[in-house]
Image: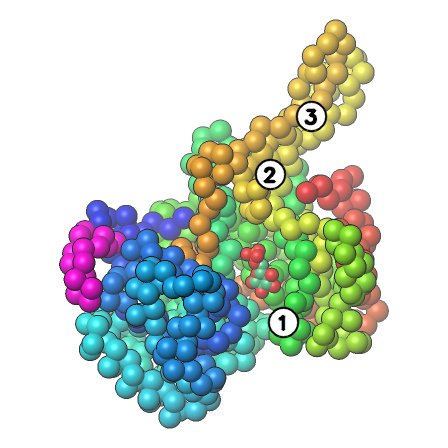
């Protein structure tokens, strides 16, 4: 989605100083990625595979290095072998061997200042050896509780260069911080204030990997790049919007984190709010980072702030009980390893949200997300209003189904539009039919992984697809009213739904007043 002038510049061909071979470069500067939490799940599952693919596609500068930092003891060799498990088995491929040269490891504790001084020495050596002009990307792939000590120690050890002027000149430093960014408005503000002591805002890349998904970037292209849809995108033509992020996975091995977060903090405050703002925002003045983020922030400012009564009426929280997925029995949330048997953490959340502005007045946005639901599917469904006059009533066709535009974020990435069509025959029958677009059939490939795009954008200094300070704080401001009410009012129930279903009956009731129901996915 981002403008990325630099990335789309003509590729240049240069001699690789390390391997004496010719490679095609994009304009990404040589730098060092320093990954904190290098032995963790995110590094294994997402970061190393994404960096490896970028390297294979020659989108990383050949001099770029990666330094893993974690508590566990590893030699560089052992770390490389451990990381290789994330991307391939069998004998090492030549692509891997080229990539592995980039990888280094430093063992240390995030709270230990000395470990950061020795990290600084290691970075200096690597930069000198590889000819990296001191550009650094610090990646916080750790539990959120480590963000503060990491920031303090990076600052105290002088590892980052604070950008003072508008222009970013080498050497530059950037930091990528995973969500959840804080656990409420106050902690997000405190964290922002702390990170700002070391980094200027344009050096801070608050990552929400949903923004790196092709299908999410396509929301704006679809809305604003097609004359046919743009005029319809408002309360005159749209009746309601439904946004669903449904997962079949449960809490997996992340109970310690999830117990403190719940889906409200893990998914709703970040991924769902991003989908909502991209769906509802006004066209930006320009297609560049700050204009886009200005408009997203404006949507968050216009969200109707819920009173405690509205929280009770317009939100639902629930936990999965024992059930089955695809015929396989699944335990209830409270029986999962590491979960408190009396846990009050929600694994499902639904809400009716109003965007109080000119464009959306009167259009409800229904949002739902949950773990252990019947199907993995993320979708934005735009339901259009019925035609003003029921012309076919006389022929017995009373209620036609509403036209629904579905932006399928994942899986089966694509877009479909349903409309009524006369079914062939002498009598007048109107049946719903669909026009469908699939990424796979239209472009011959599935969309690339979100992390690849985001890591490259950060390397290029493009923050369009990252959350700005005000966005994160505004999203918390909205969420705090819900979370505070849930916490303060023990009378508000924690509903239940069997694993493998579509969530609790209470969530269906949110839509009843609107004469509608959750769309089937
Ligand atoms: C992460 C959440 O941000 O997103 C996980 O922490 C969730 O709980 C994941 O499973 C979903 O991502 P995706 O890309 O699989 O939809």
Residue located 71% across and 58% down the image: 372
Q: Which sits earlier in the primary sequence, circle 3 or circle 1?
A: 1
Number of numbered callouts drawn: 3
Between residues 473 and 318, which one lies in front from this camera angle?
Answer: 318
Q: Point out which mark residue 376 bears.
A: none
Stretch of the chain drawn in magenta: 12-26
Indicate the position of residue 15 as horizontal and vertical percent values.
Answer: 15, 59
Q: Which residue is mark 3?
A: 432
Q: Which sits earlier in the primary sequence, circle 2 or circle 1?
A: 1
The reply to whether callout 3 and callout 1 are in contact (CB within 8 Å) is no
Q: Nearer the viewer, mark 2 or mark 1?
A: 1
The reply to whether the magenta stretch includes residue 17 is yes
Indicate the position of residue 360 as horizontal and vertical percent values.
Answer: 59, 44
* Label 2 lies in ligand 1 vicinity (Cβ under 8 Å): no
Residue located 37% across and 93% down the image: 114
Vertical placement of residue 222 versus 67, above or below: above
Q: Residue furthest front?
A: 91
Colour scheme employed for the rendering of this structure: rainbow
Q: CA distance from mark 3 to mark 1?
A: 42 Å
Q: Residue furthest right?
A: 491
Q: Which residue is mark 2?
A: 406
Q: Is residue 376 left or right of residue 163?
A: right
Residue located 33% across and 89% down the image: 117
Q: Which residue is mark 1?
A: 254
The reply to whether callout 2 and callout 3 are in contact (CB within 8 Å) is no
């Amino acid at each position: 989605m981002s403008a990325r002038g630099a990335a789309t510049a003509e590729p240049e061909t240069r001699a690789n100083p390390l391997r004496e071979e010719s490679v095609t470069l994009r304009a990404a500067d040589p730098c060092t990625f320093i990954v904190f939490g290098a032995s963790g799940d995110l590094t294994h599952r997402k970061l190393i595979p994404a960096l490896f693919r970028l390297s294979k596609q020659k989108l990383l500068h050949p001099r770029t290095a990666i330094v893993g930092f974690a508590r566990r003891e590893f030699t560089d060799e052992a770390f490389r072998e451990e990381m290789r498990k994330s991307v391939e088995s069998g004998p090492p491929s030549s692509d891997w061997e080229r990539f592995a040269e980039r990888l280094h490891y430093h063992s240390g504790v995030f709270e230990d200042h000395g470990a950061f001084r020795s990290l600084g020495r290691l970075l200096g050596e690597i930069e000198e050896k590889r000819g990296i002009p001191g550009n650094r990307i610090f990646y916080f792939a750790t539990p959120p509780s480590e963000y503060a000590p990491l920031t303090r120690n990076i600052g105290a050890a002088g590892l980052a260069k604070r950008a003072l002027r508008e222009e970013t000149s080498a050497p530059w430093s950037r930091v990528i911080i995973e969500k959840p960014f804080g656990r409420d408005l106050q902690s997000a503000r405190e964290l922002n204030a702390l990170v700002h002591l070391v980094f200027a805002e344009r050096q801070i890349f608050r990552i929400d990997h949903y923004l790196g998904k092709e299908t999410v970037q396509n929301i704006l292209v679809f809305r604003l790049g097609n004359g046919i849809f743009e005029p319809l995108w408002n309360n005159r033509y749209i009746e309601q919007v439904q946004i669903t992020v449904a997962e079949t996975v449960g809490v997996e091995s992340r109970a310690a984190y999830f117990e403190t977060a719940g889906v409200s903090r893990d998914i709703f405050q970040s991924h769902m709010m991003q989908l909502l703002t991209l769906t509802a925002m006004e066209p930006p003045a320009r297609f560049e980072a700050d204009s886009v983020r200005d408009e997203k922030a404006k949507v968050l400012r216009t969200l109707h702030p819920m009173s405690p009564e509205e929280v009770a009426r317009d939100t639902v929280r629930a936990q999965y009980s024992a059930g089955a997925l695809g015929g396989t029995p699944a335990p209830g949330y409270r029986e999962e390893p590491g979960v408190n048997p009396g846990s009050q953490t929600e694994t499902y959340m639904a809400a009716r949200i109003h965007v109080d502005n000119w464009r959306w007045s009167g259009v409800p946005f229904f949002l739902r997300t949950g773990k252990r639901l019947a199907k993995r599917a993320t979708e934005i469904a735009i339901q259009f209003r019925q035609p003003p006059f029921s012309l076919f009533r006389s022929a017995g066709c009373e209620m036609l189904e509403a036209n629904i535009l579905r932006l399928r974020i994942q899986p089966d990435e694509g877009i479909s539009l349903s409309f009524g069509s006369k079914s062939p025959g002498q009598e007048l029958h109107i049946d719903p039919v669909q026009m469908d677009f699939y990424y796979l059939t239209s472009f011959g490939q599935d969309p690339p992984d979100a992390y690849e795009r985001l890591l490259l954008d950060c390397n290029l200094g493009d923050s369009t697809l990252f959350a700005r300070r005000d966005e994160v704080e505004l999203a918390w401001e909205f969420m705090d009213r819900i979370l505070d009410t849930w916490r303060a009012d023990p009378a508000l129930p924690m509903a239940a739904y069997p694993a493998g279903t579509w969530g609790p009956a209470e969530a269906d009731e949110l839509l009843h007043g609107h004469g509608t129901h959750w769309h089937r996915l």
